[in-house]
Image (spheres, grey):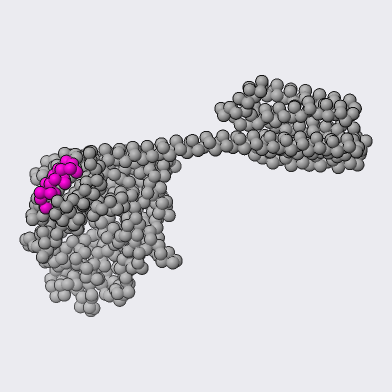
Amino acid sequence: MITRLIKFYTNEEIEPRLRMLRLAGLYTILFLMLTIPCFMFLGYDSTIYYVVLLSIVMLLVIFGIFVYSRDITISSIVFCYLMNIIILPLIYLYGGGMYGGVEVVFVCGIVDGLFLLTGFVRIASEILFFVWYLLIMIYSAYHTEIMHNTPHGAKAVFSMVICLLFSTLVIIIVMEYEGYLLKVKQRKVSVAVRESRNSADTKSRFLTNVSHELRTPMNAVLGMSEIIQNSDNDGRLTEEVSIITQNARDLLSTINSILDFSKLESGKYSMSYDQFDMDTLMRELVNEASIRAYEKGIEFFVSIDPSSPNILYGDHIQIEMILQDLLHDAINSVSDGRVFFKIYGEFSKDRSKAIYHAQIYDTGSGIPEKEMETIYSSFETYDSRQDSRIKRLGLKYSVFKGMLQLMNGSFNLKSLEHIGTLIDVKFETFCVDKVVIADSKYTTGKKVLVYAYAEKGMAYIEEALGMFNTLVDVTYMPEDFTKMLGTGRYDYILVSDTGYQDVAELLGECEKASVFVITDRLSSPADFDFYRIIRRPISSLNLSDIFFERWEDMDYEGAEYLEGFTAPDASVLVVDDNKVNLKVAESLLSRYDMLVKTTESGFGAIEMLKGQSFDLVLMDQMMPGMDGYEALRLIRNNLAIRGARRIPIICMTADSGGDVREKAMKAGFNEYLMKPVKEMELERILITFLPDEKIKRSLAGGTASTE
């Protein structure tokens, strides 16, 4: 019997409340049975025995009903009310009351209620029990005739001691058993946490490997598509290859969203902090988005506040990825309309942080109201035939919200079907310096004349010029343009390309350095008598290049129109265990006329570096036998490799983790290059790390060395 009881009360598979209820019933019945010899010793009359026997019968009936119904909540409530409203008050009145110390047993009833009842029922019941006990004691004090077996002298002391001992024993038993249940619960939680951590670690390792395994073939698909597109001179395959490229990019975006969401969900996602210039980041974003918009034939307008903080410290990779992806989606959603991108930043009160706000608005088909209700759900799919927007927006937006929350930011979306979509993004970064993108105090009062014939984005151009506090005159007719030129001296003259021929002769009388032609991406200075050109969309970025004469930051300058570069004297070693990736890398690098060598392992890289000098090494991060980190360590410490410590070694990785760059830089890599490799990123790496004397820039008029 005792063994069965012990097994019952230690069986972790049985609900704790059930075990506690059984325990309360057990010690109550045992207490009632033990009171019988005590009452006999004290010489109490027979009434108390009837009360005790009646109480035991009532408790047994309650537990019999419980065994039949199996409702723990109802049984606990009935047990507590029976004990506190009937049984304990009767024992109090027929066992001597306050003169025998019996009121101490009321504490047992209060304790039972605390551990057996829950929620509002517990609070209300405990108040009721306390008030009931108080009323009984007050009433019995004034009406002593209702009390029986009132002890005196030594008997009263004995009764008091017995009640104190029992009450203390009950409290100790309940508290100890509750402590035991708590330890059991903590042990279960500890095991669950340990298993969860092990599962998270396994999941993290799995995601790292999956990231690499999925992104590696995607690198091959996108790389080979670009190679085919570049070699398609007659344009027969342009449409087919574009479809492959677009769908490969969409698939890669979905893969990235799934992996990033899993990391955010498991708490394994980490930010990668680095110093960056917002000016540079915005230029890259706007440049890529404007090319996409131009190719699709839609209008793209940009507004960037030049007074925004510029030199920042944060996860610029994720900031760029989020804004780039949102712009890409917005442009894809518009078939015949416009996309507007606005971004502005402000310093925090102590100027230690920059708080940025970005808005992306498109006039696409929008999202139906019924879809908006679930768009933020992680795995909801929005797939409308009228919208070419990437599917699984919910998953993507969940990832973006999670990333932005890590930057103390937010993500909000508003959309109306057939009207358009507005996305608001907010994020914070640290400020390295108090420098802004462009200080308007140097341009205040400058006079600008704009000949805006057929210029659709004139309102945005005026807004951008207004941010620099310039004095702006706008004209749409040649006659007015002539009058304005004759009546005032202008520091800068902007002319729309559509009306250039109307005023070309008049421009010949102006200072050449002050004239800029607003044109699209395919036009060159030669089309406009070699006047300098300013590309659409007009924003504070390219206007600042004009006002501060930062011609080196612009992709054009008079007749010396830069089209690319070559490096015929440079040599590059590519290390990757995937032959297709090596083929892609060779094809991408071949356009720069440089010597390219490849090897499929870290061991091979070490041997090749012993026998030949290379200007640059591109090395895969994950390779069998010897990974990129181990190969890097051995190369840097190998005395047989000439200039081992000075060779620029770039980590090529398919891992999408936020801490990849930080890990690569700590390991000793000079920089990292994400797969699939983007041509713009590859060019940045080559220009940054190849010797300047080996880079020959290609110009419209011929080839010029950087020397």
Number of callouts: 0
- Between residues 140 and 331, which one lies in front from this camera angle? 140
- Between residues 378 and 57, which one lies in front from this camera angle? 57
Q: Which residues are magenta?
A: 597-613
**Can you see residue 411?**
no
Residue at 52%, 35% (x, y): give it.
188
Residue 549: image location, x then y, percent: 21, 70
Quarter of the image with the N terminus is top right
Residue 41: image location, x then y, percent: 86, 28
Residue at 63%, 22% (x, y): give it.
4
Residue at 28%, 58% (x, y): give it.
281
Q: Is residue 509 above or below residue 386?
A: below
Q: Residue furthest front?
A: 639
Tell me which corner region of the image, top left, top right, bottom left or bottom right, holds residue 575. Answer: top left
Q: Is residue 67 magenta?
A: no
- Between residues 688 and 614, which one lies in front from this camera angle? 614
